[in-house]
Image (cartoon, rainbow, N blue to C red):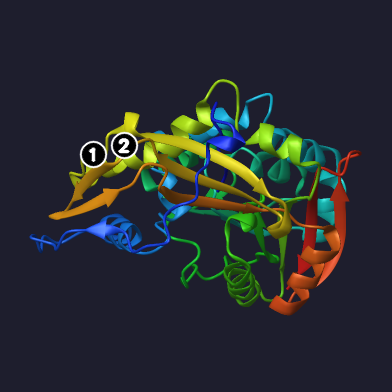
Amino acid sequence: MRNPTSSSSLSSFVASKASKPERSPATSAAPQSEFGREVQAGLARTPRSISPKFFYDVAGSQLFDRICDLPEYYPTRTELRILGECAGEIAEQVGPDAEIVEFGAGSLTKVRLLLDALESPKRYLPIDISGEHLEAAAQRLKADYPSLVVQPIAADYTMPLVLPAPLAGAGRRVGFFPGSTIGNFEPDEALAFLQLAARMLRGGGLLIGVDLVKEPGRLHAAYNDAQGVTAEFNLNLLRRANAELDADFDLDGFAHSAFYNAPCRRIEMHLVSRRAQRVSLNGETFGFAEGETIHTEYSHKFTVEGLRALAVRAGFRPGAVWTDPEKLFSVHWLAA
């Protein structure tokens, strides 16, 4: 899970009104998808919000792949460098014949560095909420690794789920959670996810990528790219709502805003209403004041010590840590 950016500046963000959002009573009881239910509930709450897990429909996943290649977006290339340079040491921690479980697998790019370094990995279980995108990526991976069992799982990895029984002769079951997606969670949610992962991976471990606290200007640039790809990624949430939920968001009526909240050590991403307007969704009408926002994502930044302390609280035993020379990013081995 990730963060975007646009040409909007820090000053473009205007705090949402403290009063209760304007809305009209529902006139339709039509059944809704999880996406529909959560968007409707998110627009009704104060402050308004939509979960970042809904960024990743097919179009959103493709846009995020573009974000990862942007010059301003350092996390992806920095993590790839760490994984490539430290692959041998990481493989020693994982051990032979492992089963790899990737949470929020996306395009299955980073796991290739891990698979290439491991000794005879048995099976790869990528989990992602975007089933169509996941299946296409899994087919490509199967073609490139014919001896590896690749078993994609279309699911919300933040919810309890039952993994397939280990294959005969398999080694440790190891989780892979790159991209600092842990930063998209609220602190209590991050702890809950790690606790869930610790139970799921008992006897194995978790390899997790974590973005580090750094100079705010560099963070701001990473989430406000000059090409506006992250803005498009953010606005795609509204485009998706229009397509799937018969909503009538005017995409020109909202602006992308991302800024670093230093006291909370996090990037905040919002969609800001450019004017007073009304939006309909599933029989309800929601009124927006000019400057009112929909919060779409947090990206918390960590210190190495802070992540290790969180891992201990979740039931892991922190092990090796790998970073780049500038200490922009870190990869942690956590024994379960």
> Where is residue 233 drawn, in percent x and y?
46, 35
The one nearer the camera, 107 or 78, is: 78
Coordinates of residue 140 in the picture (x, y in percent): 50, 34
Q: Quadrant of residue 125?
A: bottom right
Which residue type does callout 2 highlight? Answer: Arg
Per the image, the residue denoted by label 1 is: 243
Instruction: Please identify the quadrant where the C terminus is shown.
Output: bottom right
Q: Amino acid at mark 1?
A: Ala
- 118 or 212, nearer to the observer: 212
Measured as percent of width and height from the top left, residue 18 is found at 43, 61
Mark number displayed over residue 110:
none
Q: Callout 2 environment at 10 Å: few (<14), some (14 to 19), or many (20+)? A: many
Residue 10, by quadrant, is: top right
Q: Residue at x 65, y 44 (%)?
A: 111
Distance of label 1 from label 2 (alpha carbons): 6 Å
Q: Is the Cβ of the residue at disc 1 closer than 8 Å to that at disc 2?
A: yes
Q: Which residue is denoted by mark 2 in the rendering?
A: 239
Q: Residue at x 66, y 40 (%)?
A: 112
Q: Is residue 232 visible?
A: yes
The quarter holding residue 82 reads: top right
The answer to whether 77 appears left or right of 195 in the picture is right
In the rendered image, the residue lying farthest to the left is 27
Instruction: Give the SS element for disc 2.
Output: helix
